[in-house]
Image (spheres, grey):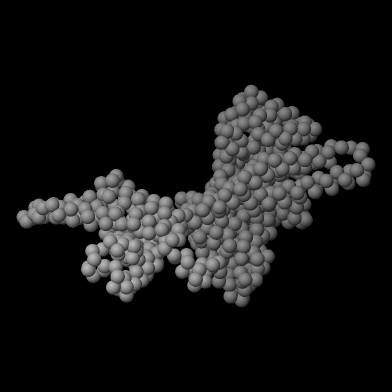
Amino acid sequence: MRVVIAEDSVLLRAGLIKLLETSGFEVAEAVGEAAGLLAAVDRHRPDLAIVDVRMPPGHTDEGVRAALVLRREHPGVGVLLLSQYVEERYAADLLSAHTSGVGYLLKDRVADVAAFLDALRRVAAGGTALDPEVVSQLLLRRQSDPLDRLTPREREVLALMAEGRSNAGIAAALVVSESAVAKHINGIFAKLDLPHAEGDHRRVLAVLRFLEGGT
Amino acid sequence: MASDTLPGRVLARAPWSPGAWRDTAHAASGAPLQLAGWTIMAAPWLVWTPVSTLPVTAALLLPALLVLVLLRPATHAQRERMWAMLGLDVPAPAPRPGGPLRGPLRALRTEDLWREVRYHLVVGPLLACGAVGVLLAWTAGAALAAVHAYAWALPPGGPLAAGGHAVRLGLLTAAGALLLLAAPWLAAGVRALDARAAVRLLGPDPAAALAARVADLAGKRADVVDAADLERRRIERDLHDGAQQRLVSLALNLGIARATLTGVPDDAMRAIVDAHEEAKEALAELRDLIRGLHPAVLEDRGLDAALSGVAARVPVKVRLAVDVPERASSTVEAVAYFVVSEALTNVVRHAGASVVDVAVRRDGARLLVTVADDGAGGADPARGTGLAGLARRVRSVDGTFRIVSPAGGPTTLTVELPCAL
């Protein structure tokens, strides 16, 4: 799996390269700013781009803007944003364009190697990976909506779904059976009036669309 | 000190003491300028007596105008005299913009100008009379005290001729001596009155000076508060660029080691695992510390984004409403952020609330922050240090802090902040 990295901190860039290479990824190129990222993706056509939100020259949201361009010009390239803090608008920007092949994680999460690599693979395969903090902030915004009808357990399940976890992953996280999870998910769909649709990530897409207020 | 006792004080005012001469010189040097105002006003009438309306008006107005123009130079001269002769520093009055002619005319309605008029046309002339009195006391005293010295030269048979008028001459000499002794006291009195009048009338207006001092202090405090805030942001940036990046990298490397090393002895692996967990915890703690200092999201994105982050992290349901169309100063935003995050921490720790309403609203030049929970109530700023710290931080930017928290709840915290310092 080929990856392009855009990260201005030299230390973290080196760490990421080492992590990816020891884990069987191929790092096609690692750059320090947003403009370089677009060029590198043009050149290498990777499966995934890991992008820091805050990069030179402005140190604000260069990464998000570059990611949006990437999603438009190279829809096949998964984009994982790394941020020092959670900014739901970044997540919303990213998700409103495309709800597949995107991720948004706090930088600290890279230290959780296994979970981070899992998130990378998910995003590269067209799935999603949202930081639990992103999800809770998005939920905070929507709590006057039909979400109020959900039971606390269903909210937990919804949050885990939004992070991009599978039924099995949710069951493990909540220490319940997979069939119980499936029951909760059906309950969520029913309460949120979500239509049935085709595709692997139907649930996640539906949840995300709901989170951005698209339904 | 000798001058504290009565003989000492009398000696200090002896006609030959330096103080007596200094006071006399001070009084005498002030008189010409103190009399100048009325001299100018009277000058036209001394040389010519106009009768018809126009010349009369001119004879009144032109000298008045001249006096008006000369007020400021005269004031400066008098201040210089106070400094040169008494070492008394009368602060400069507020500058009068508009040039030497238009300035005074524009200032006609200001209190400052009329205080100067009072010195140069009312108090000054009276002091000048005092100065004349001082000079008279000296000269008449000297002349009378020395009457014996020249009595022999007076025409024989005259009323003061030597011989035959011993008693009268003795009385005159005594009167002269008394005048000589009194002159220093008179001079000291004129000096003291002049100094007081100069400070009151020639310096800046005391009320205006107080107002300026208040404004100056308010400005300085705003600077200090801003500097503290700037310092917090600098520390945040330093931590973010330095320690945090290193720690992320360290935790990442430990994570790689943990995931990829094989064939490592169990205890060594345990050490790596422990180190990795510790590094992750340190990272979480550092992140919390940085958030408490001055979160970057606050600077980049404003209160709404920063507060939704805070609200999402607390383990209680928060309804957040931020309506701040125009951003407040960054120092004030930092205080508002601090208020909400501390208040939420308090709610989680003590209130046992099920829902918290946080509202931040801009009302003109004020930022209104309310945090209301449905918890146990009974919060008292006098007891907990958290609330007292909150109140202190709010006061530091001239905000108001109110908490209503009856036992049994609910608790409402209201903070009002100025949007600009």
Q: Residue at x 24, y 52 (%)?
A: B67
- Tell me: residue A181, above or below residue A83: below
Locate residue B129: give its quadrant: bottom left
Q: Residue furthest left?
A: B52
Question: In this orientation, which residue lies closer to the viewer: A200 or B406?
Answer: B406
Q: Position of residue B166 (x, y in %)?
A: 32, 73
Q: Residue furthest right?
A: B265
State left or right for residue B346 relative to residue B187.
Answer: right
Q: Residue at x 54, y 62 (%)?
A: B395
- Tell me: residue B235, above or below residue A72: below
- Tell me: residue A87, above or below residue A50: below
Locate residue A67: give its quadrant: top right
Q: Residue at x 61, y 27 (%)?
A: A36
Q: How many labels, in total?
A: 0
- Is residue B103 shown to the viewer in this render? yes
Question: In this orientation, which residue lies closer to the viewer: A99 or B329?
Answer: B329
Q: Position of residue A11 (x, y in %)?
A: 72, 35
State left or right for residue B183 relative to residue B375.
Answer: left
- Is residue A190 shown to the viewer in this render? no
Q: Position of residue A131 (x, y in %)?
A: 67, 47
Q: Residue at x 64, y 23 (%)?
A: A43
Locate residue A9: give its quadrant: top right
Q: Quadrant of the N terminus of chain A?
A: top right
Q: Residue furthest top?
A: A43
Q: Position of residue A18 (x, y in %)?
A: 77, 32
Q: Residue furthest bottom?
A: B407
Question: In this orientation, which residue lies closer to the viewer: B375 or B21?
Answer: B21
State left or right for residue A91 relative to residue B128.
Answer: right
